[in-house]
Image: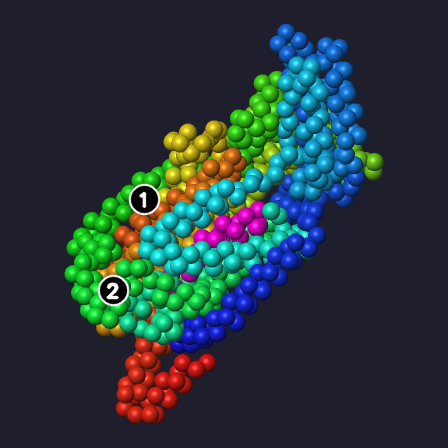
Amino acid sequence: MATFLYKLGRLTFRRRGFVALIWVALLAVGILGAATASTATSSSFSIPGTEAQRAFDLLEERNPGNSADGATARVVFKAPEGEKVTDAENKREITGIVKELQAGSQQIAKVDDPFKAQAVSQDGSTAYISVSYQVNSMELTDATRDSLEDAGKDAQKSGMKVEIGGDALQVMPHTGTAEIIGVVIAAIVLVITFGSLVAAGLPLLTALIGVGIGVSTITALANVLDLGSTTSTLAMMIGLAVGIDYALFIVSRYRAELADGREREEAAGRAVGTAGSAVVFAGLTVVIALVGLAVVNIPMLTKMGFAAAGTVAIAVVIALTLVPALLGFAGKRVMGRKARKAAEPGNGADLTKGADAKPNMGTRWARFVLRKPVWVMLVGVLGLGVIAVPAASLEMGLPDDGAQPKSTTQRQAYDMLSDGFGPGFNGPLMVVVDTKNSSDGKAAAARVSEEIESIGVVAVAPAQFNKAGDTATIVVIPKDRPSSHATEEVVHDIRDAGENIKADTGAEVLVTGATAMNIDFSQKMNDALVPYLALVVGLAFLLLMLVFRSILVPLKAALGFLLSVVAALGAVVAVFQWGWLGSLFGVEQTGPIMSMMPIFMVGVVFGLAMDYEVFLVTRMREAYVHGESPGQAIVTGFKHGARVVTAAAVIMMAVFAGFIGSSEQMIKMIGFSLAIAVLFDAFVVRMAIVPAVLALLGRKAWWLPRWLDRALPNVDVEGEKLQQQLTDTSDSAGSGDGGGEGERELVRV
């Protein structure tokens, strides 16, 4: 592989104008496709195999016009102090709002008058209008949302407080500011790392081109493939981080080759042949982690994973082709001013002596670890272990409107309903009774209502049958808020009672609704976590064994990753579930951790963390196979790689941490978890525990059984064969004309 990539690097360097033109053309085509594509009208969310989804599907089949999975909204009214919503003037205003909503959009399925639907609190201070839509929240038009938001303005003029809850107004938050902050911090880190604006600008430019192609392609195909807005957000977040990192690795190695006295084209070839090999395998681990999301069997997550994996693949190809092409345009300006002066005739020897006389920070740190490997390993493992302790108390769920900032209308509506009716009114359950196989459907539905009342809930509405009389729906109001453990127990109790009812009457009882869907979603995430971990870690272990030709190095990499992820989960639980330092991160309401967070963190962080493992340890492996002792190879790896890995980790943390400022709890949690996970994995695991373990293992770290060594293909990631070829060719070139022809043949593609 190294030889092929070496040739590719030299080719793209020589044909830089053509290569750059191809990528610019691809970007233009992607932008044109995104601009001319029809707007995505839907982004369906389904959870195959769950009871809540089966109930929705049954209702759609038996009562198709009812739009069981359509968006909902609640317009909540609170009368001024000393008044009631039932007062004549207030009642007239609310009744007028009902009519206004009914006529406000063709997407409306039903609007319930609170005075007819018994949606007035006992003290008469609060009332709410329930609004049902024919389509889900992703399919609502802007005009429909505008009519909903405008509905209560007239009532507010009369003195009543009006707020709107439900999923009808829930839209993805704008994160442009967060992305800009991440890019700015990345630019600063790159300038400090390289000391050259040109070298710093190259990774940013190529990453933005890659993200532009990936996101524009996703936008162009969104309507055809039913992709939601979260798909492009994830692709942008990951594509930007890995795009900068991969280009950073190539540019850094190119500068190192120039510093060793290589010609520019030769330096580009060697940079792509060595660092490019690490980029390929690091990219493969990210792709494996993202594509592996398919094992969860949730179509939305599968599409998100494949789309993000495609963006990562684009970032890899750009790093191998466009980066060396742009290095050809950059000339000597890719080096800092001091380095360019040092490279002038007469200064090279002094530069080398200075480098030998003053070891960099990476060299000094590696030597310290070699002196105290046991202490470094113990401090790292025990430190992460302590931080991981809160993970044992992890509770998973999906946040409701109670997790919204207090300034939002959704949160205020949530609080008004809780105060006026009780917290359970924010998350009603829908019980579906399939009486098709029952001899007496009405008696079976009555039995279900009695069983639910005995469980202990606030209210059980009368059963409503469809026209055929074979399916009934019962609305149940639990006592506690939707995301509480008590409400989850109510759902499980109803389902347990349903098994006995089916055995006695033949009627099947299914629990659905947004609250039940969230519970089922969390359970599905829980069930998929272990198989997903086994798949991703197993495949990556095989891949890293192929790269490093070792058993212990990949095993150490996988165990270190698991330690950093569990520690990151512990930090997430401490902040978002327990509320420790919550005010520092803008956490207004503690609660369960988003159910997709553990599996999402595993997928994303595993792939990203392997970047550092591959790049750092590959350089150690390269030094080892070229004759250095295991200890000296560790020092060499840190000498050349620590600065770059540090910069890459800081850039990733900056990109992810920018999302902590989002007003949405979910986005805030994702940003915090990924940033803290990269911090733990890059600086504690890869920069401390990994070299300590390698120092303790010595030559055993690179041990591989002979039979396995023969069975595994040699992909030559460390460039051993390439180095041998170049050495042989150089020797041949010095002995005659035939050698020169051989060298020209090597670099010819």
Please tell me whether residue 235 belongs to the stretch shown in magenta: yes
Name the residue: 43% across, 47% down. Answer: 184
The residue that disc 2 covers is 342
Q: Nearer the viewer, residue 68 or 189?
A: 189
Q: Nearer the viewer, residue 582 or 52?
A: 582
Q: Amino acid at mark 2?
A: Ala
User: Which residue is outermost to the top?
Assistant: 82
**Does the image show residue 89?**
yes
Tag nearer the camera, 1 or 2: 2
52 above or below 626? above
- Is 332 placed left or right of 591 in the picture? left
Quick one: quadrant of the N terminus?
bottom left
The residues tagged by marks 1 and 2 sit, at their Cα atoms, a distance apart of: 43 Å
Residue 692 x/y as whole percent = 24, 55
What is the magenta range? Answer: 230-250
Q: Please identify the dominant SS of the magenta region.
A: helix
Please tell me whether residue 332 belongs to the stretch shown in magenta: no
Residue 127 x/y as whole percent = 68, 19
Residue 89, quarter of the rendered image: top right
Name the residue: 25% across, 60% down. Answer: 639
Name the residue: 29% across, 81% down. Answer: 727
| Tag 1–tag 2 contact (CB < 8 Å) | no
281 above or below 518? below
Task: Answer few, some or many: residues within 10 Å of disc 1's Cα (few below 14, many 20 plus, some between 14 and 19).
Answer: many
The residue that disc 1 covers is 384
